[in-house]
Image: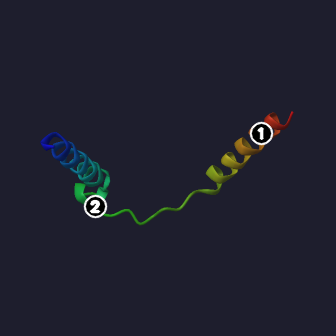
């Protein structure tokens, strides 16, 4: 029974640790607020998706 409690605690601790390290607000860089994507990246993604879809249809 103690092993199950320890495993549960470790799982929760791991999730909290990963969440804390993935947040840039906690690392001194400031919170991200610019999530814009350039038109060039959108065009490239559309081209890739179109080509993959065409190759799957053949």
Counting from the top left corner in percent of width and height, residue 8 is at 22, 47
Q: Which residue is mark 2?
A: 25
Mark 2, other Cα within 10 Å: few <14 / some 14–19 / many ≥20: few
Residue on which disc 1 sits: 51
Residue 56 vs residue 25: left or right?
Answer: right
Residue at 33 percent of width and 64 percent of height: 31
Up the image or down, 21 lies above or below 35; here it is above
Q: CA distance from mark 1 to mark 2?
A: 38 Å
- Residue at 74 percent across and 38 percent down: it is 52
First in sequence, mark 1 or 2: give its number.
2
Location of the N terminus by quadrant is top left
- The kind of secondary structure element at disc 1 is helix
Image quadrant holding the C terminus, namely top right
The structure's colour scheme is rainbow
Query: Position of 45 compared to 34: left or right?
Result: right
Q: Residue at x 84, y 37 (%)?
A: 57
Quick one: 5 or 44, which is closer to the camera? 5
Residue 46 percent coordinates (x, y): 71, 49
- The residue under the point 18% across, 49% down is 9
The disc label shown at residue 10, or none: none
């Amino acid at each position: 029974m103690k092993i199950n409690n320890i495993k549960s605690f470790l799982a929760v601790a791991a999730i909290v640790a990963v969440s804390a390290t993935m947040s840039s607000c906690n690392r001194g860089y400031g919170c991200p607020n610019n999530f814009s994507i350039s038109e060039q990246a959108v065009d490239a993604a559309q081209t890739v998706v179109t080509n993959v879809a065409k190759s799957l249809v053949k």
